[in-house]
Image: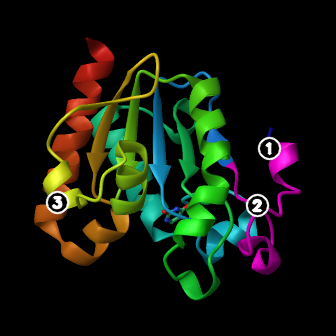
Amino acid sequence: MADDAAACTACGLSEGRTQVVFGDGSPDADVVFVGEAPGAREDEQGVPFVGRSGQLLDRLLAEELGVERADVYIANVVKCRPPDNRDPRPDEIAACRPWLARQLDLVDPTVIITLGNFASRLLLETATGITKLRGADYRYGDPPRHLVPTFHPAAALRGGAGVLADMRSDFGRARDLMAA
Ligand code: URA
């Protein structure tokens, strides 16, 4: 699937990318993280969440879930870097959505953790923002899997201790669901 995606030209983001940033981690993972879009580092290396947000994500994986990146699966709503790190547009999100749907079907996790507004709104099909959505457990797909929305790590890097504490609590919720 990643090989097919590497040649994708379904939207205009394909024109500016260095490479497609498809996903990383274990195809047998119990938990899948869904972020927003690759940034400059990710576009260079072809791996999601390798910049500052990724370092924070790795830390939370270790401290709250007791796992490493290789134990989980990490993907994004769009697989190609938007120019100047702008937000992905609705047409780009729609064009990329089938890839994410296939990733979630194949990995078939117990819990999906959506990081930030874009992933949470897309998978929950809502316009509600992450601040209201987080703090609860939802269902996604058929068969239904748990979906736990939380802030994007970039928000914790900007927003400080309160956001980080909320993320820790959301990761704890996911950990309990995986153990149940
Ligand atoms: N932010 C994201 O949402 N995804 C990445 O891969 C990196 C930063």
Q: Are marks 2 and 3 in contact (CB under 8 Å)?
A: no
Q: Is mark 1 within 8 Å of ligand 1?
A: no
**Mark 2 → mark 3, Cα distance in angstroms:** 30 Å
Q: Residue furthest left?
A: 162
Q: Horizontal and vertical percent for residue 2? A: 79, 43
Relative to residue 173, is residue 144 depicted above or below? above
- N-term mark: 2 or 3: 2
Question: Residue flagged by tag 2: what amino acid is it?
Answer: Val
The residue located at (43%, 32%) in the rendering is 67
Residue at horizontal 70%, vertical 51%?
22
Q: Out of 171 and 106, give the one closest to the viewer.
A: 106
Q: Helix, strand, or loop for circle 3?
A: helix
The residue sitting at 26% across, 21% down in the picture is 177
Residue 20 position within the rendered picture, expressed as x and y whole percent measured from the top left: 76, 60
Q: Which of the 4 quarters of the picture holds residue 162?
A: bottom left
First along the sequence among labels 1 and 2:
1
Other residues around mark 2 within 10 Å, as few (<14) / some (14–19) / many (≥20)? many
Q: Quadrant of residue 38?
A: bottom right
Q: Position of residue 102 (x, y in %)?
A: 65, 34
Q: Which residue is mark 1?
A: 2
Sort mark 3 into few (<14), some (14-19) or many (20+) by Cα contacts within 10 Å.
some
CA–CA distance in space, label 1 to label 2: 9 Å
Q: Which residues are magenta?
A: 2-22
